[in-house]
Image: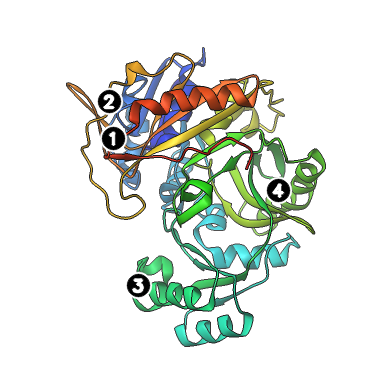
Amino acid sequence: MKVLVIGSGGREHSIVAKLASSTEVTALYAAPGNGGIADLALCVPIDVTAVEDLVHFAKEEQIDWTFVGPEIPLLAGVVNAFQQEGLNVFGPTKEAALIEGSKDYAKQFMRTHGIPTAASETFSDAAKAKAYIVEKGGPIVVKADGLAAGKGVVVAQTVAEAHEAIESMLVDNQFGQAGSLVIIEDFLEGKEFSLMAFVDGGNVYPLVPARDHKRVYDNDQGPNTGGMGAYAPIPDLQQPVIDEAIERILKPAAAGLVNEGRSFTGVLYAGLIETTDGPKVIEFNARFGDPETQVILPLLENDLLQVMQDVTAGNDPKLKWKDAFATGTVIAASGYPGSYDKQLPLPDLSQLPHDVYCIHAGTEKKADGYVSNGGRILFIGSVHHNRADAVESVKKGLKLFKNNPDFHYRTDIGFGK
C-alpha cells in the first residue's frame, strides 16, 4: 500500500519510522516532512494546511492511507476533505478535533459528560479575569482557549504571575485569536501522565501510558515548552489508576463525542494528573502527543498500518507491547521556547551509540549534513529491558551535543520523577 503522513515534526518521523517497518507499505510519502523523514519517505513540499493540495496529491498518487500527525490540519478540516473524496484517512474530523481546538469547549464537554477535571471559569474580559484570580488566590492555572503550540498554559504560583498571564493573553494578544478567551482553572496537585488510545466511535484501545516533561530546564524549572523528553511505561503509576482513567475518562469521552454528533476516529490523547481524588483531565488532544509518541511507538509490536485498518473497520487491533522501557531527551536550540537561531549545523549523527535511536523534529537535510529548522530539533531515545540501561544509553548519546552553545537539553529525563 501507498501511505502518506501529513506533518513535519518528531511525532511524524516516529510515525513514518513505524510505518516503514510494515511489510504492507510499498511507498511512503510525507508532506512536508523533515530532514530525517527524507531518509525513509519521499518528502513532498505541501504545507499541512494546504488541504486542497493534499487531497489532490493523494488522488494523483493513488494513496491508500493517509495518517494526519499534527493538530493544525485536523482543525483545518483535512480529514473532512479526504472523507468527502472517499479517501482512507486516519484522524478525527474538525468537529471531533474541537476537543483540542478549544479548551473552553473541552471544559464544557467534560462538565456535560461527568469527566473529572479541575474546576474552571472562562473569561474574555481582563478586569473580570483578574478579579476572579484575586478571589481564588494562587497557585492557579491560566490557559489560552485555542492552539498555542504547547505554550499557552501558565501555572502561576502567585496572583501577580496570573495577572501577568492575563495581560499577555487578553491585553497584549500574545497568542492572537487563540488567546482571545482564557480559561482559569484550579491548580491540581499530583503527578502528570499521558494516556492515549486508538479510537473509532465508541471503541477505545488504550496505549501504554507515558510521562513527558514540559518545562525547559532540569527539575521541571523554567517556562513550558512543547515537551523536552518523555519515557514509557511509568514505574510509579499503578494499574488501578490506569484502569480508572480508561473507564472514567477515555471511554466516556469517546461516547460523549458520539452523542454530540462528533464521532472521533484516530488517536485521542488525555493529559492527566493523578490526584488524591483519582485521575483528572488537564487537557485533551486530538492526535498523538509529541514527544510521547517517540517513546510509545518503539514499544508497540503491532504493524501500525494494520492497526489503522483494524480500528477503522471496528476490529480490536489486539495491541501488543514490548516488555521494555523507552526514554528519550529532546535536543533544542538554545533560547527555545523563546527566540532561537535556525540553520544550525548538527554534529555527525552517525557517531551516536548503536543502541540509541534519533528522531528528527526540526531539521533540514543539506548536501553536507543536517541543519536545524525549529526550536525542538532532535529526540535522542533508547529502548532497553530496564530503565537504568535505557537512561544510560541516552546519556551517552547526549554527549555528542555536550558543550555546544547552539543546543540545549535536559539531563534528568527518564528517572521516574
Q: Is residue 304 visible?
A: no
Is residue 58 left or right of 287 when viewed as pictured? left
What's under tag 3, amino acid-wise? Asn
* Nearer to the camera, 273 or 312: 273
Q: Which mark is residue 331?
A: none
What's under tag 1, amino acid-wise? Asn
Whether residues under marks 1 and 2 lie with C-beta atoms below 8 angstroms apart, the answer is yes
Disc 3 marks which residue? 173
Q: Position of residue 401 (x, y in %)?
A: 34, 30
Q: Nearer the viewer, mark 2 or mark 4?
A: 2
Q: Nearer the viewer, mark 1 or mark 4?
A: 1
Measure the C-alpha gap from mark 1 to mark 4.
Answer: 42 Å
Q: Position of residue 45 (x, y in %)?
A: 25, 35
Q: Nearer the viewer, mark 3 or mark 1?
A: 1
Q: Position of residue 317 (x, y in %)?
A: 68, 26
Q: Residue at x 18, y 21 (%)?
A: 368
Whether residues under marks 1 and 4 lie with C-beta atoms below 8 angstroms apart, the answer is no
Describe the element under mark 3 as helix, strand or loop.
loop
Is residue 233 left or right of 31 when viewed as pictured? right
What's under tag 2, amino acid-wise? Pro
Q: Which mark is residue 250?
A: 4
Disc 1 marks which residue? 404
State which quadrant residue 261 falls in: bottom right
Of the numbered discs 1 and 2, the one sitting upstream in the chain is 2
Q: Which mark is residue 347?
A: 2
Q: Residue at x 42, y 69 (%)?
A: 179
Measure the C-alpha gap from mark 1 to mark 2.
Answer: 10 Å
Of the numbered discs 1 and 4, the one sitting upstream in the chain is 4
State which quadrant residue 190 falls in: bottom right
Q: Nearer the viewer, mark 3 or mark 2?
A: 2
What's under tag 4, amino acid-wise? Leu
Measure the C-alpha gap from mark 2 to mark 4.
Answer: 42 Å
